[in-house]
Amino acid sequence: MTGLAIGRHLAFAAALAVISAAVVRLMMRFGPIDHPDARKGHAVPTPKGGGVGIAVSFLIGIAILYRFAEFARLVDPYFRGVILAATMIAIVSFLDDIFDWPFVVKLAAQLAAAAAAVGSGLYLREPRIPYVGPVEIGWLGPAATLFWIVFATNAMNFIDGLDGLAGGVALIACCFFSGIAAAQGAWFAYFASLLLASGLIGFLPFNLPPARIFMGDVGAQFCGFVLAMLGVVAARFETVELSFVMVPMLLAGPLFDVAFTLARRMVAGLAVTRPHRGFIFHVARRSGVPGLAIAATHWGFALFGGFCCLAFLRASPLFKPVISLLPLIPQLAWLAYVQRRASRSAIASWD
């Protein structure tokens, strides 16, 4: 890719960031309001729905990409599936911000959007395993992809509880993934992650502490959904074994927090769908860790995951499985730290 081409791509991304910021400003005036309650980290009513800016700029960009960028196209059914699924999750999650649907309704909507992507053919087919090569997994591919998309979507949504946390993690993940995809010649993945980063750049100045607007479900679910789909696209990098683990490495913070919390609640016999304050980042905040410090910690997790991905790409097949697990180390250290603080703060229950 020439320097001129990169410059054009960045100019296009900057224009989309301006569109995102303009939509966010509109949502600050006319969007739904998030009112404080016992589970939330803000004390005054704050506009939400800032993620509309992220979604609108991404969908404009992806439509232009579909129409004009021949070099960065997926196979047509996959491309249309991405656009349809992303549009679906944006619409239903924005309606959720307005009407605050029960979790079962949210889950059904997420499953429908994920099914649209999988139904277009965008699912894990033949993961490349070191020293083995591509492995045909049959019906497990669509099933695993559906689970992955829904889980990643909810992980980003659940972690969106502090100013700048989810948006910062998503932006760092997009920046790393865009560079990785470009290096692999995966031009659709490069452009799609660049488009999502543009929307986040337009939104984040309004969401950094103290936030003037929240991204809402429309932003958190949309970011998680698009990053999950990009993880499926990454699984098709032909020269990289285990390439399907790279997006999970970038999102290790949200994925670990949500997986640990849901597992802990299931073992304790607690309802996993009931609203609670039992996520690790919630407990850290309740134990006295400043919100900005928690958000910065998660940004650090994403940065660490990004550098692990770079090492992963350069590693021999023997070491790839080991490197893919490295992002778990800071998660375990963070969990131990929060548990110790919770104990010293006499937090009687994580819920």
Image (cartoon, rainbow, N blue to C red):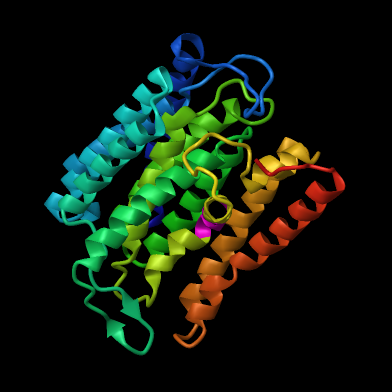
Q: Which residues are magenta?
A: 250-257
Going 60% across and 66% down the picture, which residue do you hit?
328
Residue 189, image quadrant: bottom left
Position of 17 with respect to 132 (left or right) is: right
In the image, residue 255 lies at what x, y percent? 51, 54
Going 52% across and 55% down the picture, which residue do you hit?
259
Going 42% across and 50% down the picture, which residue do you hit?
152
In the image, residue 52 lies at what x, y percent? 40, 26
| Count of numbered badges drawn on the protein | 0
Position of 236 with respect to 167 (left or right) is: left
In the image, residue 28 lies at what x, y percent? 51, 15
Residue 349, image quadrant: top right
Q: Eyeballing the image, is 349 above or below 93?
A: below
Q: Is residue 277 visible?
A: yes
Q: Eyeballing the image, is 232 above or below 286?
A: below
Of all residues, the one furthest to the front in this rendering is: 269
Q: Is 255 inside the magenta-drawn segment? A: yes
Where is the N terminus found, in terms of image quarters?
Answer: bottom left
Q: Is residue 5 visible?
A: no
Where is the C terminus found, in terms of image quarters?
Answer: top right
Q: Is 227 inside the magenta-drawn segment? A: no
Depth check: 288 or 67 in front? 288
Of all residues, the one furthest to the left in this rendering is: 77
Of all residues, the one furthest to the right in this rendering is: 344
In the image, residue 207 lies at what x, y percent? 59, 28
Q: Main secondary structure of the magenta part?
A: helix
Residue 276, image quadrant: top right
Going 68% across and 29% down the picture, which residue do you hit?
209
